[in-house]
Amino acid sequence: MNRKCVLFDLDGTLFDSSEGIKMCYRKGLARFGIVVEDDSDLDKVIGPSLYDSYSRFFGLEGEDVIEAVRIYRELYNHEGIYRVKMYEGVDCMLKSLKQNGFTVCLATSKPYVMAEKILDFSGLKPYFDVLCGANLDGSMRDKIELINECLKQSGFTDKSVVYMVGDRFYDIAGALNTGVHSVGVTYGFGTFEELFAAGAEFICTSPEEVAKLLVN
């Protein structure tokens, strides 16, 4: 059996984490006088790093970005982290991949400590061979860095047998820029149009479809 490696994004790929993320953004932004009228306005923040989102989408700069991230993490650690729902079929997908000899990695812009907690309490952690997430100081949050770190830790040098699975264009761009296969999923927060425009090599509509694509 040829060894293969698959890297997964977390938010929007393994879990619907929107409830907790949006709640923390909404409460945190209010402290800067920014009112979010419609929760759908926060769909865009799921995927990018906190630093990038506060700067790009809400116009915060310098120390305000650092303070906004601090507030968000405080709220998330106490209230938001457990408000996640595993997408139906994710556990079966991971089980199938492991049974078929895949090395399974996590490549998420969410801080490592938070991502590990979510995988732990959800029961998914044993499926993963490598966990890569952002550092709390904001470093190692770029998807290219995360993918390269996963490859380094897993020992894969043949990128023709490596797949990056994610729901946003950041995941696809990371895959394209590191030379691994890209698999977009539409059951998360990204759309088919977004993933297609980003250049996704494959687009799947469910975890079951991801497993079939990779195993066959």
Image (cartoon, rainbow, N blue to C red):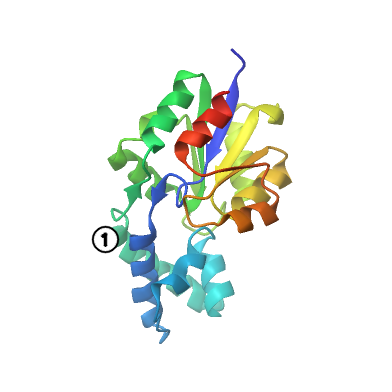
Q: Position of residue 141 (x, y in %)?
A: 56, 54
Above or below — where is 213 with respect to 29?
above
- Residue 157 visible in rendering: no
Q: Is residue 61 left or right of residue 31?
A: right
Q: Quadrant of residue 176?
A: top right
Packing grade of label 1 (10 A; few <14, some 14-19, many >=20) is: few
Q: Disc count in the image?
A: 1
- Residue type pointed to by label 1: His
User: In which quadrant is the C terminus drawn?
Assistant: top right
User: In which quadrant is the N terminus drawn?
Assistant: top right
Query: In the image, what residue occupies the spot 49% across and 78% down?
Result: 64
Q: Quadrant of residue 67?
A: bottom left
Query: In the image, what residue occupies the spot 51% across and 44% down?
Result: 205
Helix, strand or loop status at disc 1: helix
Above or below — where is 159 with respect to 47?
above
Residue farthest top in this picture? 1
Q: Position of residue 58 (x, y in %)?
A: 52, 78
Q: In this figure, which residue is indicated by the disc labeled 1? A: 78
Above or below — where is 60 with respect to 108?
below
Q: Position of residue 209 (x, y in %)?
A: 51, 35
- Residue 12 visible in rendering: yes
Query: In the image, what residue occupies the spot 45% across and 19% down?
Result: 99
Judge by depth and name the residue closer to the eye, 163 or 204: 204
Q: Position of residue 199 (x, y in %)?
A: 70, 50
Residue farthest bottom in this picture? 33
